[in-house]
Image (spheres, rainbow, N blue to C red):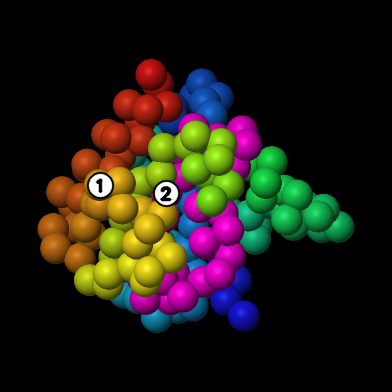
Amino acid sequence: MLRSHRLRFNVSIRRLPEIPRKYSSVTRRTTAKSPKRLFKHWNFRGLRCWISSRDVAGGENYQEAIVHAIRNAKIMLLVFTDNANNSDEIKKELVLASRNKLTVIPVRIEDVLPNDALDFELATRQWINFFGDWERALDTLCKRASGILQG
């Protein structure tokens, strides 16, 4: 079973709404330009990431924590890879994000097209592709996320 991780961001010193972040843990280990690398660069740009596997307290109900994070967010970032494409948990959380009217920003760090279920869910969203110009894509993502959170 693939384990998924959710992240949230805070921009600058003010506390802003959280951004759950989705990716498959297998992706972390197998992709050179991984979500972990994204987190490092976001920190340099003033965005803070929250990782559920790190920040959900011991003994806390993991599913409830995920649902609460999604309900309290404005944005969900989906780091899309082949592993994420096959994660049932990501499908569930995208449905919750849609139900709670979050802006979902899919970012592709691999040149992978979504399977049927995710294709349906992501059909109306603009991708940010990271498998080409990494720095340009990172700038685009950071500006987009900051604009949504501050607006």
Residue type at numbered disc 1: Gln
Mark found first going from the N terminus, 1 or 2: 2
CA gap, disc 1 and disc 2: 12 Å
Label 1 Cα neighbours within 10 Å, binned few <14 / some 14-19 / many ≥20: few
Q: Position of residue 67 (x, y in %)?
A: 67, 46
- Asked if disc 1 and disc 2 are in contact, CB closer than 8 Å, the reply is no
Label 2 Cα neighbours within 10 Å, binned few <14 / some 14-19 / many ≥20: many
Residue in view at x 37 percent, y 76 percent: 82
Residue in view at x 81 percent, y 55 percent: 61
Q: Secondary structure at mark 1?
A: loop
Tell me which segment is drawn in magenta: 70-94
Q: Position of residue 145 (x, y in %)?
A: 36, 35
Q: Which residue is mark 1?
A: 126
Asked which quadrant contains residue 81, the reply is: bottom left
Mark seen at residue 77: 2
Locate residue 1 relative to residue 91 in the image: left or right.
right
Is residue 112 shown above or below 49?
Answer: below
Q: Secondary structure at mark 2?
A: strand
